[in-house]
Image (cartoon, rainbow, N blue to C red):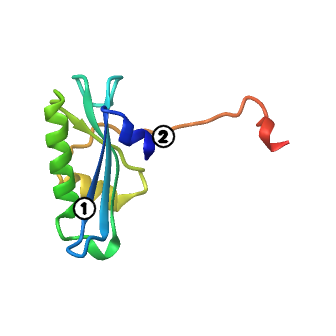
Amino acid sequence: MAIYLRDDDKCVLLALSDEGECVGLLEAALRYDYVEGCSTQPVCYLEGLFVSPQFRGKQIARKLVQACERWGRERGCVEMASDAELANQSSIEMHQKLGFVEANRNVHFVRRLRENPLNV
């Protein structure tokens, strides 16, 4: 979190309850490398979004994303992107409700080349 707070290309937004309790968090960053489905740079990339379960369905995610959109536009972005795990259907549905359009689906692979020296 300290990295985000020191970097002008990163954004942290909080949603607070009437009592001042943090009930939502959004992290975003400007990405200058290739972003799946995008054709411009930088891209305002939604790195993480969380709303406390008891506060879901109250438009908190929508308001956080709208604030993030403003942040991105102020920095020259014309596109916003995000991702979700294939098995995270609730995240996929939330993205769709917020106006995101699916750009692609990927399965990522890893192959270990040698043993991790820290696990000796």
Amino acid under disc 1:
Ala
Quadrant position of residue 4: top left
Q: Residues within 10 Å of mark 2 (few under 14, many from 20)?
A: few
Name the residue at 17% across, 42% down.
69
Amino acid under disc 2:
Val
- What is the C-alpha distance between the residues marked 1 and 2? 33 Å
Which residue does the numbered mark 1 point to in the structure image?
A: 15
Quadrant position of residue 90: bottom left
Relative side of 111 to 100, left or right = right
The quadrant the C terminus occupies is top right
Name the residue at 34% across, 24% down.
34
Which residue does the numbered mark 2 point to in the structure image?
A: 107
Name the residue at 20% across, 63% down.
60
Q: Residues within 10 Å of mark 1 (few under 14, many from 20)?
A: some
Whether 101 is drawn above or below 77: the answer is below
Q: Could you say whether the residue bearing mark 2 is in a helix, strand or loop?
A: loop
